[in-house]
Amino acid sequence: MLRPILIATAVAGTLDILSAFVFAGMAGMGAVQVLQFVASGPLGDSALASSSYAVAGVLVHFLIMACMVAAYMIAAPRIPFLLKQPLICGIVYGLLLWFVMYWIVRPMRWANLPHPTNPKSIANQLFSHIILVGIPIALIAARYFRPAKQPSAA
């Protein structure tokens, strides 16, 4: 169980943070600022004042991703459909993660941060959560937990 969690966390976590850097860069924000914002979630607004919190931002990001991955990896062997249809389930899981992050987690931490309304921003967020997070997690789970095919008898 640990191996697929580590692999999916590394893959989805790296893809997700790189997309955050690209989309934030398009809006004029640097990678260090992105990581400071991530760190400010659990560590408070003081993380925004010092670039040294960028390292904490990386750790926080990958810890959150590990939780997202672990939840799927625990469920996948128990729910056969998750392994039989990884593409569909990855899309749905990505949508679920986007909803949880943008409509529950972020508003709980940053009450003044508005819900997403800009179609371009929502498209970027959904791209990241579905294509770069949900689908890779589901595909890696299917790869590790799908029963091996038995050789056919001749």
Image (spheres, rainbow, N blue to C red):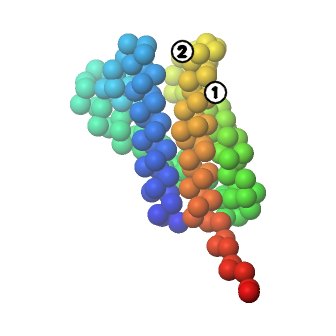
Percent across and percent down for residue 84 are 73, 58
Q: How many labels does the image show?
A: 2
Residue type beneath disc 1: Trp
Depth check: give the residue in front, 48 or 54: 54
Q: In this view, does 32 lie above or below 82?
A: above
Residue 100 seen in this snapshot: no
Which residue in the protein does label 1 denote?
103
Q: Residue 50 occupies which quadrant of the picture?
A: top left
What label does residue 31 carry, if any?
A: none
Percent across and percent down for residue 14 are 42, 41
Give me the residue at 53% from left, 66% from top.
1
Depth check: give the residue in front, 129 or 104: 129
Farthest residue to the bottom: give it. 154
- Report the side of 150 relative to 8 (left or right): right
Q: In this view, does 100 lie above or below 75?
A: above
Percent across and percent down for residue 97 are 61, 38
Which quadrant is home to the C terminus?
A: bottom right
Q: Is residue 57 above or below residue 119?
A: below
Say what secondary structure mark 2 lies in.
Answer: loop
What label does residue 112 carry, if any?
A: 2
Give me the residue at 57% from left, 50% from top.
137
